[in-house]
Image (cartoon, grey):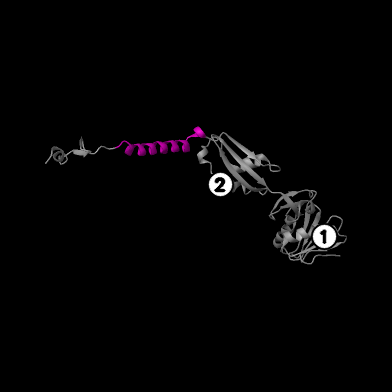
Amino acid sequence: MSAAGRSSNRPGVRSTRGRPVRGGIQRSPRRWLLPVAMSVVTVLVLALYYSPILGVRSVQVDGLAAVPERTVLDTAGIELGNPMLQVDSEAIRSRLGAVPEIADSEVHLQWPSTVRLEITERVAVAYVPADGPGESGVRLIDAAGVPFRTVPRPPAGLAQLRLGDDRADGVRTAMIALTALPADLRAQVTEVRAERPQNLFLVLAGGRQVHWGESTAADRKAAILVPLLTRSGQVYDVTSPDLPTVA
């Protein structure tokens, strides 16, 4: 047996291309670098989570028109100095959702120290007389049918809703019709009669009426109504979009 063959059988010796390598298995330093790196990252994350080093220094509010900024800040409940990583965006959005005038909100963390609140306010498209205990004036209603604010008098360009016993269905049907109309035509609607939600009437400035009927095919009815109103008449019937009439 040759010397090379004998050396390959000796303990602690490995042959690499015929060259003996002594010292047994050598461990790579990469095996302990990963655990150390993970430990360092964990310590840093914990330090940032509990430390005020990257704490909230300011709160910015965007999108306000009617809601006071102080109302938003107080409701959001964001404490200055708290670590940014402890800001609970969903909890903040939930609290802001309790403000009647706010339709939606978004919470953005702007590092290193600013929380930005993006607010979407409700926009009134109709109103009903305020009828709560001790209330006077009118209640504004947005496109989703949500009453959200009481004001002393109706703003210009809004339609009054006249509702029957089924108020919820009446509001829903009225909103479907109003939001289907182009903005300039909607501004001409002074009244929506929804005493019977499935037999809706719109009253326009000047006294002309639109017999809308059910809430179905709202977009088609609105598209037909625009040219139909160029014809002389007092009652414009779009209950059947295939057979609109003017009387």
* Residue range of the region highlighted in magenta in the rendering: 28-54
The C terminus, quarter of image = bottom right
In the figure, is residue 184 to the left or right of 113?
right
Mark 2 residue element = helix
Q: Disc 1 residue type?
A: Leu
Who's the residue at 13% across and 39% down the image? 2
Location of residue 21 (image quadrant): top left
What residue sits right under mark 2 in the picture?
Answer: 91
Say left or right for 47 vs 102. left
The residue shown at (73%, 56%) is 180
Percent x, y for residue 88?
Answer: 53, 44
Q: Is residue 179 visible?
A: yes
In-front residue for pair 8/114:
8
**Is 46 a magenta residue?**
yes
| Element class at badge 1 | helix
> What number is the disc on residue 172?
none
Relative to 21, is 202 on the left or the right?
A: right
Q: Which residue is mark 1?
A: 228
Crowd tier of the residue under label 1, counting other residues whose Cα lies within 10 Å: few below 14, some 14–19, many 20 or above = some
> Could you tell me the amino acid type at mark 2?
Ala
